[in-house]
Image: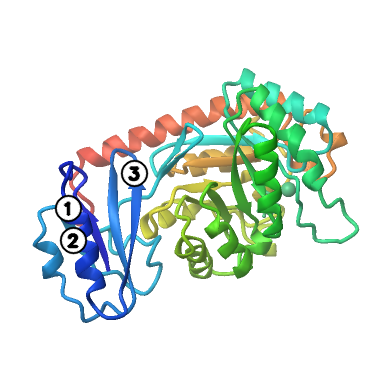
Amino acid sequence: MIIVMRADLPAGSHDLDQVVRVAESYPGIKAHIHVVHGASRSVTEVHLHGSTATIPTKPFEEFEGVEKVVRVSEKYRSIGRHGGQMEALGFEHNGVKITQDSLHVFAGLCAVDNPRNVEDTFKALQSFGLTTARMGAYKPRTSPYDFQGHGASCLPYTFELAGKYGVKIVTMEVTHESQIGEIRRSLELTGHATGVMLQVGTRNAQNFELLKAVGQAADMPVLFKRGMGITLEESLNAVEYVASSGNRRIVFGLRGMKTNLGDPHRNFVDFAHVPVVKRMTRLPVCIDPSHSVGRRATAPDGLLEIFHVTAQAVIAGANMVLVDVHPRPAEALCDGPQALLLHELEHLLLDVEIARKAYQERCSLAASRPKAGT
Ligand code: PEP
Ligand code: MN
């Protein structure tokens, strides 16, 4: 059961305390308070944990400060929309607001290789007006003989350079919970030169201990990438581990599915699921065209295939684009063949703007029409 408090709760109201008191007067019930930052307002929710099936809603509805009481299904308790009754969850991190209505492009190296390439990438991002980036220090590789990432040793210069070029958030994959502490220590060492969003990669989508660990990291949001060989439902259950461990600042990432039916793309592009995830969950949705397409092929119309799939997701309402770029792909130690050149990133950003405008026009048109099904 979730009790949603009124957003305009008068100062000095004791209704929140009273709601918690009433909730915890039922045997075995624990109340957890969450403040939700949506696109247009912030609201306080009281989540009741324990067996709530027989608890009546009336005692809560009687408080003036309560907006509504929602009985949630077992599934996706924290992240679910529960039949459209729960509004989207968003968050602000280091000055960047991410919601189901916003759009940000996070561009950068798949894997940090050397300071020169990191610096040239951040410098280019700044010249294109981007303040959001991706960088990999810990790489989960299919073969143990492949480059595994420079690990903690590259964090200080990566964060310092991010700060130097105005990057506010870097998404960075972690493959083990000990790396969360390493990232935290490097951020402190560099005087919090930038912010970090922890990334859980597709290969760790059901690494439940890692999911719980990032769920306990209250200081950093999480980008969860869908498991490439499991159902959407299994991935949604997995991400619920993060939310139920305490961290609800989550972005759900689509990055393609492992099947030969998608050939010649690296993974079968799953961006038709953008509106589905936004309907089923309260989370902003990210797409990763680089790991989906996996190559820099250009279509006969002059557009890279990476541009085409990105536009398809943006026109469907995606909130974040995670894209590999490299100033010198031949020097890349991981995924060079799919990295955009810097001038191609500039082109992608202009192309994304066109798709985003089209999405906004589609929303305005939908708002002016009779509701579907009525
Ligand atoms: C990545 O983003 O660097 C990555 C390894 O992605 P994925 O987990 O989707 O393969
Ligand atoms: Mn990669």
53 displayed left or right of 344 = left
Mark carried by residue 18: 2
Taking the view exactly as shown, the residue that stands out farthest to the top is 127
Of the residues tagged 3 and 1, which is closer to the observer?
A: 1
Mark carried by residue 326: none
Q: Amino acid at mark 3?
A: Gly
Q: Quadrant of residue 231?
A: bottom right
Where does the N terminus fall, quadrant-wise? bottom left
Residue bearing the label numbered 1: 14
Name the residue nearer the viewer: 169 or 225: 169
Q: Amino acid at mark 1?
A: His
Dot placed on the residue nearer the N-terminal end, 3 or 2: 2
With respect to residue 131, does 97 lie above or below?
A: below
Question: Label 3 to label 2, Cα distance in Å?
Answer: 24 Å
Q: Amino acid at mark 2?
A: Gln
Residue bearing the label numbered 3: 38
Kindly indicate whether the residue at mark 1 contacts the one at mark 2 (C-beta within 8 angstroms).
yes
Q: Position of residue 126 (x, y in %)?
A: 63, 21
Kindly indicate whether the residue at mark 2 contacts the one at mark 3 (C-beta within 8 angstroms).
no
Numbered disc 2: secondary structure: helix
